[in-house]
Amino acid sequence: MTQETYLTGITTTGTPHIGNYVGAIRPAVASSRDLSRKNFYFLADYHSLAKTEAPNRIQRSGLEVAATWLACGLDTNNAYFYRQSDIPEIPELTWILNGVTAKGLMNRAHSYKAQVQANEERGSADPDKGIVMALYNYPILMAADILMFKSTKVPVGRDQKQHMEMTRDIAQRFNHRYGDILAIPDAEINENTATLSGLDGRKMSKSYDNTIPLFVDEKKLRKLIMKIKTNSLEPGEPKETEGSTLYEIFRAFATDDEVKDIEKRYADGIAWGEMKRLLFEYLNDHIRPMREEYDRLINDPAVVEQELVKGAERAREISVPYLAEIRHAIGIRKLG
């Protein structure tokens, strides 16, 4: 049986929150310990150039994200954990893939079309106003990320499905021209990916400014939990768990028996203030060991850098010879 190769890109813009942990980091950490498959996790720092112009923020976010994944227990001896910019073969493959990618394919990218639509709605004479090539070519760099390591499975959200279809299209065009060299990956869309509601009841998202950062200090964590929106039911009045952000967050971290106990307390009319106190104490106890490791790593970035360098060296044992094979196939060869 052929070993599956999974690849996950991690954006380096913004600070990870508990929704990121429940939906992506925790299951990925569990997968990193699975010896039956290859797992690649990378910091997509080149991708961040399409989203931010703040160099210091890109660097700081890269440290925070890498430290988060390490503090949460990512197995870097089994999985490959590296920074995109430490793999020079990726941008070279991106340029090679440019040679087989139709412009019309990029014109149909959702992210590009959304920017064009926004310009048109503002009445701009230039539909491409403010659009950089990093955004326009984003799907080609993403394709190179995936194809560089012969990925067979790529866990993505439904909003990323189009990029996976583009990656497959680009790989198939390349193989049609040069032979079966690139692996054709499949998207793995988990319809049951856990999501959490934020402080205001909407989906937890940096876009809504309603997140609870994963490793915020205890005082700030308590303050944020106390801000979670609830209804006006009084203490002693039975409460529904459905639609309760407090219950939703608790359930994401608790055992089945603990969830059953909370459901009973909801039915018995637990006061919202008591539930917020309980959630804070439970969440803080759960996160504290990881927070302590995170703080240690943030204060010693050389340790994080060492892990990323180690991961890049391991990854390049694959990317260097594979790119040499690709270069030979397209005619970039020694003359004698």
Image (spheres, rainbow, N blue to C red):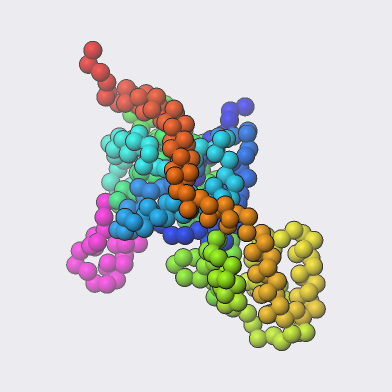
- Nearer to us in this view, 248 or 223: 223
Q: Position of residue 139 (x, y in %)?
A: 37, 47
Name the spot of residue 256 as percent of width and height, x first: 77, 59
Residue 193 visible in this rendered orientation of the protein: no
Query: What count of labels does the image hold?
Result: 0
* Region rendered in magenta: 113-133
Quadrant holding the C terminus: top left
Q: Is residue 59 left or right of residue 9?
A: left
* Residue 229 image-quadrant placement: bottom right
Q: Position of residue 244 (x, y in %)?
A: 65, 73
Q: Image quarter for residue 34?
A: top right
Say if the magenta span includes residue 143. no
Task: Tell me if residue 193 comes above or below residue 217 in the rendering.
Answer: above
Residue at left 75%, top 64%? 259
Q: Is residue 68 above or below residue 316?
A: below
Magenta segment: does it hold 132?
A: yes
The residue sitting at 62% across, 39% down in the picture is 33
Q: Decide: is 216 above or below 183.
A: below
Is residue 308 shown left or right of residue 285?
Answer: left
Q: Residue at x 29, y 71 (%)?
A: 121
Residue 264 appearing in the image = yes
Question: Does 77 sit left or right of 180 as displayed?
Answer: right
- Looking at the figure, which quarter contains the N terminus? top right
